[in-house]
Amino acid sequence: MTKRRFAQVALTLLLLLATAVPALALPSEQPVLNAIHVVQAGETLSSIAQRYGTTVQAIMAANGLANANLVYVGQRLRIPGASAGTSAGTTTGVYVVQPGDSLGAIAARYNTTVANLMALNGITNASRIIVGQRLRVNGSAPAAGGSATTTGARVHVVARGDSLSAIAARYGITVSAVMAANGIRSANLIIVGQRLRIPSAGATSSSGGATTYPGGSRNLRFQVSISAQRCQLYAGNTLLNTWRCSTGRQGSGTKAGTFRVQSKIRNAWGSRWQFWMPYWLGIYWAGSSENGIHGQPWYPNGGQVWAGLVGTPITFGCVMLDNTTAAQLYSLAYIGMPVVIRY
């Protein structure tokens, strides 16, 4: 048989086989897999669970977590029941800036433009984005001078010399409410020219809303003794609690005086020291940084800062409590609560 004749016979056999064997049935859908979520600055298990439509308990079980509070930036979490292709940014419309990001790269990822991202987030300089910053990646930017997307909200353009506390006072709202309305993680991170949504005076944030206090009033006072390394909480003239606390180390002493709580953040990021400060209550400005009251700090890798040193002057100017005490104070504290610091 010639080579040409052999090739013709082989081709005929292949065609017969192709028509005789039925096509393999393919599944109509790909199976649902566990998505992998990389923890970003400011996230909690609760917010992650809400983002993917699952529960905190399910995520803890899938990842062998024993404590819902111990997640850290960069940690990879399996999300049970979520598609492996799920994108946190496209689900929520918010993207958290990661190391090495640029507005151009983020815009390309979400099929938008740098100009639109700048307008959506009140950014005036495309080069000035910060790791941990929360960016809106879809939607329409408010028109200049008009109302924002939040009902009853206004827009304030940050001017030179503005601070969040001054802006909040101007509009009769809390720093926490402004931060919540704009996805701001640190009260220090506002930029001249930035457009801030100002919610109505009746709006409250999850961390800054009304709370029931002893005696049914907002008549609390927090006192700090630098010399004794002791803190006390009063309701009027009634002493409620006395706690050990730590104030500033030599060269970074805590400032004495009478102040008021001006910001309230569940987990505040100390960019200067690269650690988290839980149960943050900001009380005064020390240059460009805000000093406050907080629990025991921790690094993004989970390591605790100043472990076992509550009661020793060790901080960089803040007042530190143990986490249990700090959580208790945080649950009671409110914007405007007096803080008296004495030697």
Image (spheres, rainbow, N blue to C red):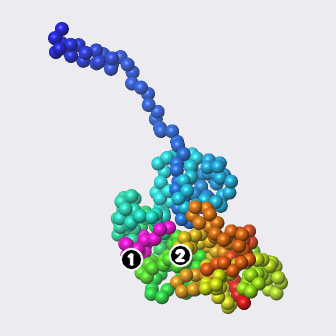
Amino acid type assigned to the residue bearing label 1 in the image: Thr
Amino acid type assigned to the residue bearing label 2 in the image: Arg
| Element marked by disc 1 | loop
- Observer-nearest residue: 128 or 121? 128
Residue density around tag 2, few if under 14, some if 14–19, many if 20 or more, within 10 Å: few
Describe residue 339's horizontal placement relative to residue 214 as left or right: left
Q: Which mark is residue 272?
A: 2
Q: Quadrant of residue 343?
A: bottom right
| Element marked by disc 2 | loop
Q: Residue at x 58, y 79 (%)?
A: 175
Q: Residue at x 45, y 64 (%)?
A: 99
Describe residue 244's horizontal placement relative to residue 41 as left or right: right
Q: Position of residue 182 (x, y in %)?
A: 51, 72
In this rendering, does residue 152 appear at all?
Answer: no
Q: Residue at x 23, y 13 (%)?
A: 9
Q: Which residue is mark 1?
A: 124
Residue density around tag 1, few if under 14, some if 14–19, many if 20 or more, within 10 Å: some
Q: Position of residue 291 (x, y in %)?
A: 61, 81
Part of the protein shown in magenta: 120-132
* Dominant SS type (magenta): loop
> What is the spatial separation of the Cα atoms under label 2 and label 1, in whole angstroms?
24 Å
Q: Position of residue 198 (x, y in %)?
A: 52, 78
Q: Residue at x 71, y 78 (%)?
A: 312
Q: Quadrant of residue 107?
A: bottom left
**In what quadrant of the picture does the N terminus appear?**
top left
Q: Judge whether 336 appears above or below 179 on screen.
A: below
Q: Judge whether 155 appears above or below 324 on screen.
A: below
